[in-house]
Amino acid sequence: MSLRIGIVGAGANTRSRHIPGFQEIDGVEVVAVCNRSRESGQKAADEFGIATVYENWQELVAADDIDAVCVGTWPYLHCDISIATLEAGKHILTEARMAMDLAEARRMQAAAKGSDRVAMIVPAPFYLESEPTLLQMVADGAFGSLLEIHVSALGGGFDTSTPLHWRQRRDLSGQNIMAMGILNETVRRYAGHDRALVAHAHTFTTHRPDPEGGKRAVDVPDSLGIVTELESGATAVYHISSVAKHGRGGCFEVHGTKGAFKLEGGKAFVALEGDDDFRILDVAPEKAWGWDVEADFVASIRDSKPVTHTNFDDGVKYMTFTEAVQVSLSEGRKVELGTL
């Protein structure tokens, strides 16, 4: 019996990744799509040979000929669609930035716990090829106790004429700021969870052209710094910016009592006891991994494979981090995550 997928939100990532990914899997069929308008939904249907176009997501979720739903919308709809899908007895895969805020994430988590369906979030895609090897090295004590973690995600460019993006609107993206959630998700895979943090942010471009006309205020910061204490006692420092054109983007450094590792430029590097500097990490072919979102989702449905990248419980953890950042910014204080 085939697995029938419905798509809600056929944006760029869904068209370039999720729909083709599902269509490459034997016995999986993308049978329906719903987008922001009937016209855009039909365009996606024509492009990928999808049989049915729905005008609203509620009808798609309720359809009898759909077994699972893939949500590619902006975060403002993730919670409602995910809960409705699970309540309809269907599996759910939702895009990253799990929800608008921690309260929504917890509602999604409760719905998943009350269902026997698969609930999965599109995982942070960074450096998955080397992850199994590095995780084993961490577990084996190759780096000793972790002490210092530095995350640099400086990119973009200072161009005030660039139109407002949905990521710069809190009504569409919620408490999420740039890529901080998926960066934290990546750090937590190696170093565990956060105990407390303090954050500072700034918005250098306060208004941008609105694609719908005129100008609109930017209410999501374009520069963010976070200092966090992990439950292990390690310190992590994040510097994230969307106005640093020549910045050091997407770099993770993890330093321990015996060595260090670095993720940068799509490659993993290690410096072990006796090394004078970082050297590239050799990953055995049989241990190399990848970003197989669609295949992992299908395997969880068909073979009961546990969801590790990423389940709703882990999503709630990075949404707790996200919430703590917002509380720290609004109240100007250190925030204990356990109090949220």
Image (spheres, grey):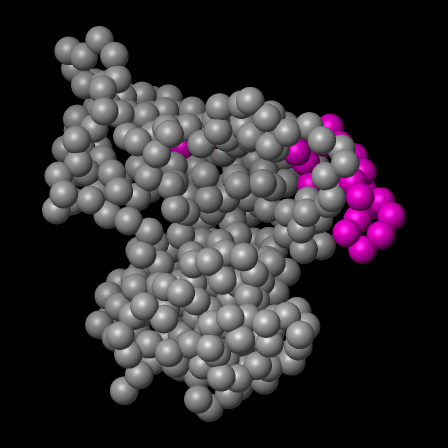
- Extreme-right residue of the structure: 214
- Res 300 quadrant in image: bottom left
**Residue 92 position within the rendered picture, expressed as x and y whole percent measured from the top left:** 43, 70
> Which residue is pictured at 63% across the width and 60% down the height?
76
- Extreme-bottom residue of the structure: 64
The answer to whether residue 85 is visible is: no
**Residue 151 position within the rendered picture, expressed as x and y whole percent measured from the top left:** 45, 28
| Observer-nearest of 263 and 110 | 263
Decide whether residue 176 is among the magenta residues: no
> Which residue is pictured at 60% across the width and 58% down the height?
74
**Residue 172 position within the rendered picture, expressed as x and y whole percent measured from the top left:** 67, 55
Magenta segment boundaries in residue numbering: 202-231
> Which residue is pictured at 40% across the width and 65% down the height?
20
Q: Is residue 316 above or below residue 1?
A: above
The answer to whether residue 27 is visible is: yes
**Residue 171 position within the rendered picture, expressed as x and y whole percent measured from the top left:** 71, 54
Q: Is residue 269 above or below residue 103?
A: above
Q: Is residue 161 left or right of residue 75?
A: right
| Observer-nearest of 327 and 274 | 274
Q: Is residue 196 above or below residue 269?
A: below
Tag count:
0
